[in-house]
Image (tube, grey):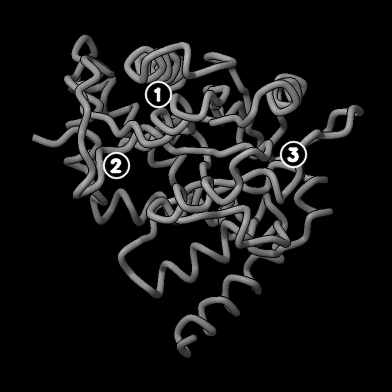
């Protein structure tokens, strides 16, 4: 591990000790910097204007402004998350699960569960699911049976830092987060075991991945990956859509909606279309909650 990584870890650890309200103070400064430097401004405005062609420029500009506020909050929440104190995170109620009983029921009744995630809300908080579980009924799953699939960033430096952010609140890094290129081998090694796998499903297909046309999503012809869906169909897993919705500053609502109990009874196209319909409905209800700076639609 390089000196730069050690230094950055120390700085983030020190900053994370501030109260969450203080982090949101810094968020305003980050937003100002992003707007001053026009961080991915062209991408944001293009994505928004094509997704909402009925809106005028002033409305699109206002959506972009709210998006930058949301993105800045995501950054400071990630720093707060670095403190690695489960009690503080749990007491903050930063995230609350809306219907944990559904996740319990699917885990207990299905041979496995695939949760189709997206870049709504603060997706980096997903692995800390047990910190957001406030139900009186004990969770049927645990860290060893809940795995988030992620795409490794190209920079080794930021890869190490993001690993710290994602894994700060968990004790079992090797099981809770698995890189996308290793997930099939990981799943095959646990065949026959009940497990929940979280697949981010809304990004543009990775280089080398086979893109699949799904029709229109947010008013644009869209290509999608189907890795998680295909695995669910082959293994007969249950599939659910999940959304992290920012209800207010400092509070997300985690909602799970069942798509099917047995994916083998459906086709990948049917499941994927259902996922995108649910995602689009959530984005239209709360547009600033989505990651508009991502080059989702490529020419």
Instruction: Mark 1 vs mark 3: give the one in front.
Output: 3
Residue at position x 17%, y 31% from top? Answer: 46
Task: Name the residue that disc number 2 marks.
Answer: 293
Q: Quadrant of residue 233?
A: top left
Which of the two discs, 3 and 2, labels the residue nearer the N terminus? 3
Instruction: Mark 3 vs mark 2: give the one in front.
Output: 3
- Badge count: 3
Report if the CB atoms under discs 2 and 1 are less than 8 Å apart: no
Which of the two discs, 2 and 1, labels the residue nearer the N terminus? 1
Where residue 272 appears, as percent x and y from the top left, is 37, 20
SS label for mark 1: helix
| Residue 255 seen in the figure | yes
Tell me the tag on residue 274. Answer: none
Residue at position x 51%, y 42% from top? Answer: 123
Task: Name the residue that disc number 1 marks.
Answer: 287
SS label for mark 3: helix
Where residue 167 appears, as percent x and y from the top left, is 62, 60
* Location of residue 279 with respect to 12 vertically, above or below: above
Marks 3/2: CA distance? 27 Å
Where residue 250 appears, as percent x and y from the top left, is 65, 39
| Lateral position of residue 14 relative to residue 71, left or right | right
Marks 2/1: CA distance? 13 Å
Say few, some or many: other residues with alpha carbon within 10 Å of mark 2 (under 14 / 14 to 19 / 20 or more): many
SS label for mark 2: loop
| Lateral position of residue 108 relative to residue 249, left or right | right
| Lateral position of residue 174 relative to residue 160, left or right | right
Of 269 and 151, the residue lying toward us: 269
Say few, some or many: other residues with alpha carbon within 10 Å of mark 3 (under 14 / 14 to 19 / 20 or more): many
Quarter of the image where the C terminus is located: top left
Task: Name the residue that disc number 3 marks.
Answer: 132
Residue at position x 75%, y 26% from top? Answer: 108
* Location of residue 11 with respect to 25 vertically, above or below: below
């Amino acid at each position: 591990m390089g000196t730069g990584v050690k230094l950055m870890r120390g700085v983030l650890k020190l900053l994370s000790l501030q109260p969450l309200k203080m982090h949101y103070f810094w968020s305003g400064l980050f937003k100002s910097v992003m707007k001053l430097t026009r961080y991915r401004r062209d991408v944001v405005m293009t994505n928004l204007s094509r997704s909402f062609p009925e809106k005028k420029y002033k409305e699109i500009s206002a959506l972009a402004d709210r998006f930058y506020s949301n993105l800045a909050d995501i950054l400071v929440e990630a720093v707060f998350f670095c403190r690695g104190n489960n009690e503080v995170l749990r007491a903050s109620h930063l995230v609350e699960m809306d219907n944990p009983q559904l996740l319990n029921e699917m885990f207990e009744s299905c041979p496995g569960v695939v949760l189709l995630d997206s870049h709504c809300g603060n997706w980096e908080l997903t692995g800390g699911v047990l910190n957001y579980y406030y139900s009186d009924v004990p969770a049927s799953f645990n860290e060893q049976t809940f795995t988030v699939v992620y795409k490794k960033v190209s920079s080794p430096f930021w890869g190490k830092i993001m690993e710290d952010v994602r894994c700060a609140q968990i004790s079992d890094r090797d099981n809770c987060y698995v890189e996308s290129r290793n997930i099939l081998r990981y799943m095959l090694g646990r065949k026959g075991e009940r497990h929940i796998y979280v697949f981010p499903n809304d990004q543009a297909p990775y280089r080398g991945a086979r893109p699949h046309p799904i029709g229109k999503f947010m008013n644009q012809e869209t290509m999608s990956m189907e890795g998680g869906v295909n695995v669910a169909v082959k293994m007969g897993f249950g599939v659910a859509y999940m959304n992290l919705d920012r209800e207010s500053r400092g509070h997300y609502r985690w909602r799970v909606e069942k798509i099917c109990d047995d994916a083998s009874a459906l086709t990948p196209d049917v499941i994927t279309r259902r996922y995108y319909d649910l995602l689009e409905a959530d984005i239209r209800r709360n547009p600033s909650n989505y990651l508009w700076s991502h080059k989702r639609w490529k020419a």
